[in-house]
Image: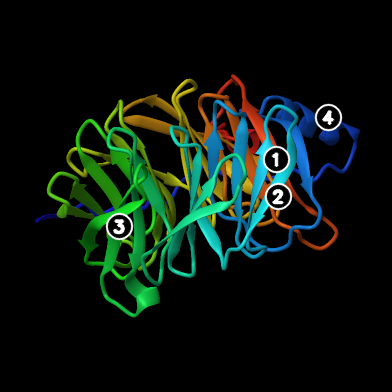
Amino acid sequence: MKKTWIGVVVATCFSVVTEAQPQDTAAAATVTRAEQSAPLALVHTIPLPDVNGWFDHFAEDVQGRRLFLAEEDHKSVEVFDLRTFKSIRRISGFETPHWILYQPQRDELFVTDEDGTVKIFNGKSYRLVETVKLGEGTDCITYNPRTNYLYVAYGGRDAKSHSSSIAIIDTATHKHLGDITIPAARIEGMDVDPSAGRLYVNMTSKEEVGVVDLNKRSLVETWSLDLEADANVPLRLDAANHRLFIATRTPTRFIVINADTGKVISNLQAGLNADDIFYDPANKRVYLSCGEGFTTVYQQEDADHYKFIARVTTGPDARNSFFSPELDLYFVPTVNRKNRNAALLVYRPRAVTVNTVPPSRRPQ
């Protein structure tokens, strides 16, 4: 296994857009103009008045126009109709649901649960059809559409182990085919490059990115990020440009890495408690949802150049999100806090005039 150190240099100068607190009509008009020029336009708000606690990750059924959302503390999965933008079903029976895969060929839903299982549901009746037992720490997933294999992280710290496992599940047969061992107590975001036969994984407890050869079913390379422990969480691959997008929590950074060599291409400021990151290939943007209550938007000028363009206010603890390139929609759930009920916010990307420096910070 090849191990490379790719220390991340943290810049001390960056642009941050602060949320204006309008004190008069002119200021209010400025805020309105800013909202109108934001790269994400709010088009729907779906109330979830009886849902309390944290959310987690999403899946979509593009053909059936359905969206699935894991409701961690509510111990359920919410099903939304994206034709009417309403909640149509709630699937219960979980300890704590985390990640979801919708498999369209079989019309089945795969949900990782904190009880150490992957639960499989029929997509029409929403009835449980099978349970695959893995072990403690069952959490994040990624999927290879070429093989129909689902990769599921489990073990590690929750299992009182210094190493984690990535289970290989055949979604056609529901069989657990084997495991890939990862020498890290905590692993987080994963993504697959089907054409290259590679899986990328955030080895979070070691501040490293791991590269797995899917044919060998083994870790073949690691790239050190030189961060504080448990920092690198969400990860997303831009396969066309061979770029990995990673968000870290300590320090709060958005990092772009060459997916072939591990070289750091870009390193920009991010928000606190980021948990999901998505790439919008049509608009050449990256959306990073942060628990501070906003989504940070970055522009990809080309494969090697990125810049901050906006932060879009979302809501309390809105650290999770989902982007559908097919539907051109971006989804953010907001948590029930004080006098504000939980809701699912639906945004549509739009073209904007890029201005990376707020007016008050422009050089004279």
Give the CA separation, mark 4 to mark 3.
Answer: 53 Å
Q: Which structural element holds mark 1?
A: strand
Q: Which residue is mark 1?
A: 345
Amino acid found under the numbered disc labelled 2? Gly
User: Given this view, does label 2 or label 1 mark the residue nearer the observer?
Assistant: 1
Q: Nearer the viewer, residue 309 or 69?
A: 69
Query: Around disc 1, counting alpha carbons within 10 Å, would you say few (fewer than 14), some (14 to 19), or many (20 or more)?
Result: many
Query: Around disc 4, counting alpha carbons within 10 Å, would you say few (fewer than 14), some (14 to 19), or many (20 or more)?
Result: few
Q: Which structural element holds mark 3?
A: strand
Residue 300 lies in quadrant: top left
Asked whether residue 228 is in view, the answer is: no
Q: Which residue is mark 4?
A: 29
Eyeballing the image, is 185 above or below 26?
Answer: below
Q: Which residue is mark 3?
A: 167
Amino acid found under the numbered disc labelled 4? Ala
Residue 103 lies in quadrant: top left
Q: Position of residue 262 (x, y in %)?
A: 21, 44
Q: Which residue is mark 2?
A: 315
Quick check: marks 4 and 3 in contact, CB under 8 Å?
no
Q: Which structural element holds mark 4?
A: helix
Give the CA separation, mark 4 to mark 2.
Answer: 21 Å
Give the CA separation, mark 2 to mark 1.
Answer: 9 Å
User: Given this view, does label 1 or label 4 mark the residue nearer the observer?
Assistant: 1
Query: Is 163 on the left or on the right of 173, as rendered?
Result: left
Give the CA separation, mark 3 to mark 2.
Answer: 35 Å
User: Given this view, does label 4 or label 2 mark the residue nearer the observer?
Assistant: 2
User: Does label 1 or label 3 sit earlier along the sequence?
Assistant: 3
Q: Residue at x 36, y 55 (%)?
A: 152
Amino acid found under the numbered disc labelled 3? Ala
Q: Position of residue 240 (x, y in %)?
A: 30, 26
Give the CA separation, mark 1 to mark 4.
Answer: 23 Å
User: Does label 3 or label 2 sit earlier along the sequence?
Assistant: 3
